[in-house]
Amino acid sequence: MKSYIESVKDEIQRRDPDQTEFQEAAFTVLDSLEPTLADHPEYVEANLLAQLVEPERVIQFRVPWQSDDGKFHVNRGFRVQFNSAIGPYKGGLRLHPSVNLSVVKFLGFEQILKNSLTGLPIGGAKGGNDFDPKGKSDSEVMRFCQSFMTELQRHIGPDLDVPAGDIGVGAREIGYLFGAYKRLNGYQNGVLTGKGLTFGGSLARTEATGFGLLYYTNALVKAQGDTLTGKRIKISGSGNVATYAVQKATELGAKVVTVSDSNGYIYDPKGIDYQVVKQIKEVERGRIREYADRVASAEYHGGSVWDFDVDYDIALPCATQNEINKDQAKLIAKDGAKYICEGANMPSYPDAIAVYRDSNILYGPAKAANAGGVAVSALEMSQNSERLSWSFETVDNRLQDIMEDIFEKSQAADKKYHLDRDYQAGANIAGFEKVATAMLAQGLV
C-alpha cells in the first residue's frame, strides 16, 4: 500500500510541481490512508486515490473592475470543483492577495473530506480571487463582485455548485454576489449560502464555525475524561471564526486569553471580552490593537501570538493556513497545552503536527474541527429547498449534534485501526471511506 501511495504522490509532484499548498494537504491525507487501503483492496484496484487528488473541473477566469478613481483593474478568479460523489459541489469563496490555484486546490481537497464528515450530502469545492477587499469602498467591492459573478454564474447552481463565504467574503460580499446572480438568472436562493436573513439566510450561520469548533473541542476533551471548565485557551485571529469561538468558549466555562490579527495580538489575563472584539471587528472594521485602548487589563504586542510564551491548556488557531511552524509548536508544548483544535484551514505545518504527536498533545485537524461553517451552510441549503426558516435553537442543536458526530466518527476510525488517538488520521479515514464507497458505486464518472 505504501508503494501505491508513493506512486500517487509522485504523479502529483510531476503534474503540479509548484503547488506547495496543495501538495502539503494531499500528501498529509494520502499518508494517513494506508490502514484503510489495506482493509479495502478494491480502493487500490480502482485507483481511487488518483481520482481523488485530481479535480473534476478547474475554472480560471479574469475579473475586470473599476475603482472609484476611474482606474481599471484585472484580478484572477478560480473555482475548483473537486469531487461530487456524495452531492453537489460545496465550498467557500476566498478574496485575498494570496489566492492562487495551489491555495484553492488545497482548500477544495480538504473540503471533500470535511463535507463528507458532516454526514450531509455535499461534495467538495473551493473558489476565490486575488482581489483584496481591505481598504476598498462599498462601491468598489460591489463592482468587483458583480464582475466576478458575471463569469462564475455560468458554473454554479442550487443543485450543481453552491459557494459560500471564506476569508474576505462576508455578508456584504455575499449580498452583492447574490444580487448579481439574481439579475442574470432570476431568484434562486439556494445558489449561495451565508446570505442575509432577509433573503434566504440561516440563523446561526455567522456563529457556526466558531461555535462548531468549541463543540468539537468539548467532545474531544470529554472523551479524555476532562472538561473545558476553567481551561485557559489561546486563540489566534479576530475574525468571524475567532470571535465566536471566544464567545462559545466563555459560555462553556473556559477563559480565552488571546486574540490576534495580521499585525499583532492581544493578551488579556482576565479573559477576552468577545463583545469588545465584535464591536471593533464587525461594526467598526478596526484593528485588534484597539482592544487594548478599551480594556484596562489587556496588552497589545506586535508579531505572532504563537511566539508569545504564557501558560495555557488549549490552543485554537483560527487565523489562516500555515500560521504555526515547528518551533512555535514546541513552544505550545512547553507552555503546557494538552489540546489543539484547528479553526482555520491547515494552520499547522506538517512538522508542527509531528511535534504535537511527539509531545502527546491531542490534535483536532481543521477538516473535522472547523466543519461547523459548511455544516450550517448545508442546513441553509435544506431550508432554502423547503422554503422554510428554522429557529436559531434548531440550527444550533443540529450543529452541535453534527460536530459531536464528527468527533465520534474520527474516534471510531482511530480505534478500529489502532492509531493511538491520532484523530487526524481518524478523520481522514472516516471522511475518505464514505467518498470512496460512493465513487466505487458510481463507476468511472
Image: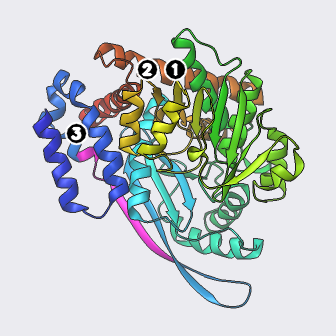
Q: Of the residues tagged 3 and 1, which is closer to the observer?
A: 1
Q: Which residue is mark 3?
A: 443
From the viewer's perspective, is 158 left or right of 421?
right
Amino acid found under the numbered disc labelled 1: Asp
Instruction: State the CA–CA distance, disc 3 to disc 2.
Output: 26 Å
Amino acid found under the numbered disc labelled 3: Gly
Mark 3, secondary structure of its residue: loop
Q: Residues within 10 Å of mark 1 (few under 14, many from 20)?
A: some
Residue toward you, 379 or 403: 403
Say the numbered circle drawn on residue 405: 1
Instruction: State the CA–CA distance, disc 1 to disc 2.
Output: 6 Å
Instruction: State the CA–CA distance, disc 3 to disc 1.
Output: 29 Å
Amino acid found under the numbered disc labelled 2: Lys
Tag 3 and tag 1, C-beta contact below 8 Å: no
The segment highlighted magenta reads 51-62
First in residue order: circle 3 vs circle 2: 2
Tag 1 and tag 2, C-beta contact below 8 Å: yes
